Amino acid sequence: SYVLTQPPSVSVAPGKTARITCGGDDIGSESVHWYQHKAGQAPVLVIHYDSDRPSGIPERFSGSNSGNTATLVISRVEAGDEADYYCQVWHSGSDHVVFGGGSKLTVL
Amino acid sequence: QARLVQSGAEVKKPGASVKVSCKASGFTFTSYDINWVRQATGQGLEWMGWMNPNSGKTGYAQKFQGRVTMTADTSINTAYLEVSNLRSEDTAVFYCARAGSGFHTGYSDSWGQGTRVIVSS
């Protein structure tokens, strides 16, 4: 089965830049989507197809994907960005949707 | 805009079954696959499977095959997830989510509010 590996936690000071990685075998050849999930709420799509932002998502959110690593970048981090972030791909080999284990973003 | 509203919390005994509903509005229900995702206590998001409300076609994660059934009633724009033979490890929040591109092979752009299922004797 296809495995996506994320760091369990990422910490950043307000106003700084957070980078959350998602590792997978040749993930650069897959389309990666990112979700923000706050406790008690439904997940929210923040990036789709590696780097596209859905309407309503601030420009501070961006993404990239190459080689074995996809990255979600949050610029000028705010307290309200504190949440769990998940990467997701569809793995054609198994016809399965796969989520990374999630990364907890803490704003110091 | 697209909206998914799920049924309320459930408490079940081990070995029982649970059926969660997900009512869609604001979009053409039969044009989008519906994914089901769960979050067990203290765990991350876990994909359970997908279904196409128009064709009834489904695809289940290997882990859940044989224990999960996904269906839909297009007359009332509602998708259902049934999980049988519940065990304590199934205590979780279950989410339905619309496949934004129409197909389960992409992203999920609209999510239900979640249904908490507690399995306890």
Image (tube, rainbow, N blue to C red):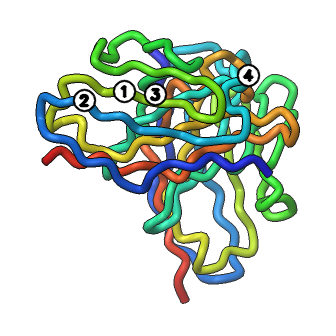
C-alpha gap between disc 4 and disc 1 = 26 Å
Please, what is the three-letter code of the amino acid marked with disc 3? Leu
Do the dots labelled 1 and 2 sit on one chain?
yes
Label pair 4/2, CB-CB below 8 angstroms: no
Q: Residues within 10 Å of mark 4 (few under 14, many from 20)?
A: some
Q: Which secondary structure, mark 1?
A: strand
The residue that disc 1 covers is A73
Q: Which residue is mark 4?
A: B103
The spot of residue B102 in percent (x, y) is 69, 18
Q: Are marks 3 and 2 in contact (CB under 8 Å)?
A: no
Sooner in the amino-acid sequence: mark 1 or mark 3: 3
In this rendered view, identify the residue nearer to me: A40 or A3.
Answer: A3
Q: Please determine whether, in this image, residue A8 is positioned above or below residue A17.
A: below
Chain letter, disc 4 residue: B
Q: Give left or right: position of A95 versus B47.
A: right
Callout 1: chain: A
Q: Which residue is mark 3?
A: A45
Amino acid type, mark 2: Thr
Secondary structure at badge 4 equals loop
The label number, if any, that marks residue A17 in the structure image? 2
